[in-house]
Each structure stands twice: as C-alpha cells, then as structure tokens.
Image (cartoon, rainbow, N blue to C red):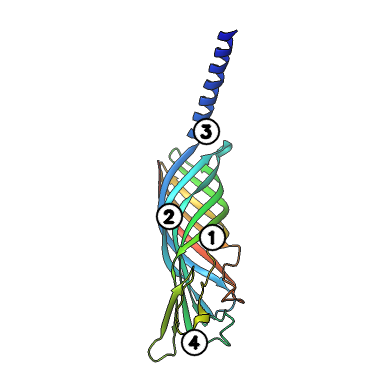
Amino acid sequence: MKKLKISLLTFILMCFVTNMSAQTNNFQFGVKAGLNLSNASVNDASESNARLGFHAGVTVDYTLPMNFMIQSGLLFSVKGSKQEKLNGSDWIPNSPDMTHTFSQLYLEVPLYGAYRLVTASDLSLVFGAGPYLGYGIGGKTKQKFNNSTDNTEYKWDTFGDGVYDNSRDHLKGETLNRFDFGAGVKLALEYRRYTFDVGVTSSIINIANHDNYKDMRYRNLNASFSLGYKF
C-alpha cells in the first residue's frame, strides 16, 4: 500500500512537471525598439501637429492553439503633440495666439490577441489588436506666446504639481492625468527571430486634468514602427 501511494505521488508529480514544462515552452520573450509619430485629439485647438518620439522595452508572447497567441510586455514610450491656440482651461477667456507643446513619457503595458499567418518556412505575418494601459512618469508642457516681442515661454510638469509662473499660484497643477487607457492594432512581419511591426493606438478615455483644464478633451494618438528580436 505504501509503495502504491509513493508510485501514485510520483506519477502525479511527473504529470505536474511535464505540464509546467509544456506551459513554459508556450512563452517567448523578446526585446523591441522603434519610433513613435504621436499626436492628440483635442477638442478646442485651432491646429494640431504631430511630434516624433521613440519606444523601447521587453515583449512576451504566449502561444495558443491554432496559431493564436496573447502578446504583452512593458514599454517605455515617448509621446506628445503640439497644439495651436489651445483654449482648454477656465482661466483663458478666449484663444490667444500661443502654442502648447506636450511631452509625455509613459510606461505602457499592451495586452493583444494575435493570429500568426505562416507564409513560408521562416516567414510569418502576425495580426494583433487589443487594449493597453499607460502610466505617465515624466515630461514637460511648454507654453509659448507667439505674438510676444520676447517670445515669452513657460514650462511646467505634464504630470504632477508643476508651476510655470510663480507669481500666479492659481495656475499650479498638472496638464494631463497620469493614467491612459486605450486600444490599438498592429501588423508584424516575423523572419526567424527578427520582427518588424507597424501599429496604431488611440486613447479611449479623456486624459486632460479637469482641475485646471475643465473643458479640454485630450486623447493620445500614436503610430509606431518597431524592430525586435525574440529569444
């Protein structure tokens, strides 16, 4: 009886180890980096211009049956935009001739469902879509008065308790909320362990801070171009 129990426990342990090994083999880790071309959807700017940024980080794929997979990772991403004649706060009575330049540094976690289409022995196309979560960790907002003779500029923190004019305390506060939530799609070309992908993302929520920008709606828009390697 004792030998039977030992044999049974050994069998269960072997099944558990085998199952864990199989699940571990379903994971594939990698790295990626590339360029961002970002802008924002803003409700009351006369003109919106894109800015160039970059991203870099680690990726993880979990393989599912029938060429499906779940893709995630952790990315450092630099986004931003340039807005002309922005009138998004309760202290601006009209739209003066000024430019707001937003710089936004994020940590982002995407969670995409994807499908791999094998086109050759070493070549695949991957289609992916899903949500992402971003957390702002830095960046500056710059305000420039274009009709000023001395090109007056003010800077403050995009996220956090920045002050851009010490003589006007009521202008304290961040421009954008730290948390961003959105969705995106991507198309990737995989050759052996190398990847090239193109993707677009958009905020779903309004990330404007309503304490100082009560009427403004600000949503990130981004196109990314990445090179990667999978281990």
Seen as rendered, the residue at the extreme bottom is 149
Disc 2 residue type? Ser
Which secondary structure, mark 4?
Answer: loop
Q: Quadrant of the N terminus?
A: top right
Disc 2 to disc 3, how far (Cα)? Answer: 28 Å
**Mark 2 or 3, which is nearer the eye?**
3
Disc 2 to disc 4, how far (Cα)? Answer: 36 Å
Which residue is label 1 attached to? Answer: 201
> From the viewer's perspective, is residue 91 above or below residue 109?
below
Residue 77 visible at all: yes
Q: Quadrant of the C terminus?
A: top left
Counting residues from the start of the chain, the first of labels 2 and 4 encountered is 4
Disc 4 residue type? Asp
Counting residues from the start of the chain, the first of labels 1 and 3 encountered is 3
Which residue is label 4 attached to? Answer: 97
Which residue is label 3 attached to? Answer: 23
Q: Closest to the observer: 215 or 42?
A: 215
Which residue is label 2 attached to? Answer: 226
Question: In the rendered picture of this protein, how many numbered marks are placed on residues?
Answer: 4
> From the viewer's perspective, is residue 132 above or below residue 122?
below
Disc 3 to disc 4, how far (Cα)? Answer: 59 Å
Disc 1 residue type? Thr
Residue 227 visible at all: no
**Mark 1 or 4, which is nearer the eye?**
4
**Mark 2 or 4, which is nearer the eye?**
4
